[in-house]
Amino acid sequence: MKRSAKIRMTVLAAGGVVVRETSLIAVVRLRKDKSWVLPKGKLKPGEDALAGARREVMEETGHNVSVEGFLGTMSHAEAGKLKVVQFWRMRATGDPARKLMDDVTAVKWLPLQQAVNTLTRQQEKIFLGSVGQTVLQAAEPSTHNAAEPAVPQVFDRGGPLKPRTLLEAIRVWLRRLT
């Protein structure tokens, strides 16, 4: 049986690369397998990916966040299912506003390389390694107009593209496979 035939269902998820104090990135420890991951989670039925990302990050880090830009999409096979996760660049605002959800046992705020090294899952290490510098550069105070946030572009064969929906991001991903 072909590998693609084994993938029976797509799991849609969203999350964030969250920065605090311009140089620290959040990683969270999951209770079920003690793995260190970027804050993210499955979308609720009918939930917008951006709203789901904000909700999941707030539940897993305890912080309110401001969303500052779309970072990209990561996908991988997990338990016979395709998991597609959209990520946004986020900033923690203030002190923790709520307690962590039961699925998370700890949050660490780490410099970029230490965050990459702490992550358990290889695909997340690669993703954070590829977007981390962009996230930190955008978090630094700058001299350019604050009304024009730096948003990294996502490219498709046809040129720059920023998916507006998770479904659109999946379509872009599938086009790259063909």
Image: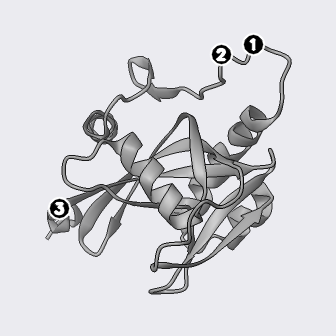
Give the residue displayed 45% in from the left and 78% down from the top: 103
Q: Is residue 30 above or below residue 50?
A: below
Relative placement, left or right, of 167 versus 142 is: left
* SS state under label 1: loop
Task: Please provide percent x and percent y for residue 63.
Answer: 61, 57
Label 2 near label 1: C-beta < 8 Å?
yes
Q: Where, by quadrant of the figure, is residue 110 drawn?
A: bottom right
Disc number placed over residue 36 in the picture, else none: none
Q: Where, by quadrant of the figure, is residue 69 drawn?
A: top right
Where is mark 2, residue-wise?
A: 148
Q: Amino acid at mark 1?
A: Asn
CA gap between label 2 and label 3 equals 38 Å
Give the residue displayed 14% in from the left and 63% down from the top: 5
Q: Please identify, in this view, whether the residue under mark 2 or under mark 3 is nearer the observer.
A: 2
The local crowd at label 2, few if under 14, some if 14 to 19, many if 20 or more residues have their Cα within 10 Å, is few
Q: Amino acid at mark 2?
A: Glu
CA gap between label 3 and label 1 equals 44 Å
Q: Which quarter of the rendering shows the C terminus? A: top left
Q: Is residue 7 above or below residue 85?
A: below
Where is mark 1, residue-wise?
A: 145
- In this rendering, does residue 74 appear at all? no
Q: Is residue 81 above or below residue 91?
A: below
Camera-nearest residue between 47 and 124: 47
CA gap between label 1 and label 2 equals 6 Å
